[in-house]
Image (cartoon, helix red, strand yellow):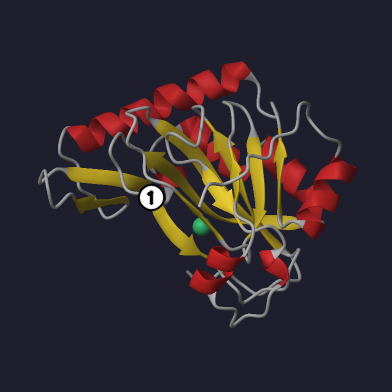
């Protein structure tokens, strides 16, 4: 099944982002992070990729072994704020994303920080919901894109409105029956999605590295993070 592509031509206002988040469960703030900060974050995350390439297999470097090549495939660096990368830690603790999250869902706290990385050849992420132990609109994930994300290198895909489905919604059946929308992004874009949204991403067979830094923000009234 091919996926339609949704993309706004210019950065929407907070009100537009709020409306899209409420109705669709996701929205994109285009060009929200300036090029200088993106360049710095690329340097820091290059160093982390270098550590993995050099054999670092700490618990925060999440990888799997490719059955056909035997290669270790990195797909996530967990606890990113604890990896000695100052710009990444700032993004988690104090900087611009907190203001965006607060404007969207009220007073918030950052709860989880990670780098999602699609190394060339890595498999996609199966359809899932990040968590369902919170009400719609009370916990969101913000993804800062460091590289271009396209359909060809496995960009984010979502079922619009699925954040409003019941906790026990059948995820595989919903994405097969529902509208699946691919959400490409450019460096500096921030993708916002409700943690309840049904989403996934494709494989990256075309060899273009794609990194994003993902941070969860939860409103003060939501339940605490569980995993
Ligand atoms: Ni997810």
Which residue extends farthest bottom? 168
Q: Is residue 49 left or right of residue 225?
A: left
Query: Closer to the camera, 89 or 60?
Result: 60
> Residue at 14% across / 43% down in the picture?
71
Asked whether residue 130 appears in the rendered view, the answer is: no
Residue on which the image places disc 1: 124
Label 1 element class: loop
Q: Is residue 79 at least partly visible in the picture?
A: yes
Specify few, some or many for label 1: CA neighbours under 10 Å numbering under 14, 14-19, or 20 or more.
some
Q: Is 9 left, or right, of 185 in this rendering? A: right
Residue 10 at what x, y percent from top left?
A: 78, 26
Q: Position of residue 30 (x, y in %)?
A: 71, 30
Which residue is rendered at x = 69% and y = 57% of the image? 160
Q: In screen coordinates, is 153 left or right of 220?
A: left
Q: Residue 72: x percent and y percent?
A: 18, 45
- Residue 4: image location, x then y, percent: 62, 43
């Amino acid at each position: 099944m091919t996926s339609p592509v949704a993309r706004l031509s210019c950065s929407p206002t907070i009100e537009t982002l709020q409306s899209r988040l409420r109705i669709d469960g996701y929205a994109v703030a285009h060009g929200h992070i300036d090029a200088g900060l993106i360049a710095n974050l690329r340097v820091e995350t290059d160093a982390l990729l270098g550590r993995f390439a050099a054999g670092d297999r700490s618990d925060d470097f999440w990888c799997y072994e490719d059955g056909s090549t035997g290669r270790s495939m990195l797909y996530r660096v967990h606890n990113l704020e604890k990896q000695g990368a100052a710009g990444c830690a700032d993004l988690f603790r104090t900087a611009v994303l907190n203001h965006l999250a607060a404007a969207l869902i009220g007073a918030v706290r950052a709860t989880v920080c990670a780098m999602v990385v699609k190394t060339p050849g890595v498999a996609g992420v199966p359809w899932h919901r990040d968590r369902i132990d919170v009400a719609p609109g009370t916990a969101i994930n913000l993804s800062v894109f460091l590289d271009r994300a396209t359909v060809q290198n496995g960009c984010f895909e979502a079922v619009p409105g699925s954040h409003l489905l019941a906790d026990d919604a059948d995820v595989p059946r919903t994405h097969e029956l529902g509208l699946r929308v691919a959400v490409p992004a450019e460096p500096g874009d921030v993708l916002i999605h409700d943690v309840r949204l049904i989403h996934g991403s494709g494989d990256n067979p075309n060899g273009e590295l794609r990194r994003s830094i993902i941070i969860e923000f939860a409103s003060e009234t939501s339940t605490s993070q569980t995993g």
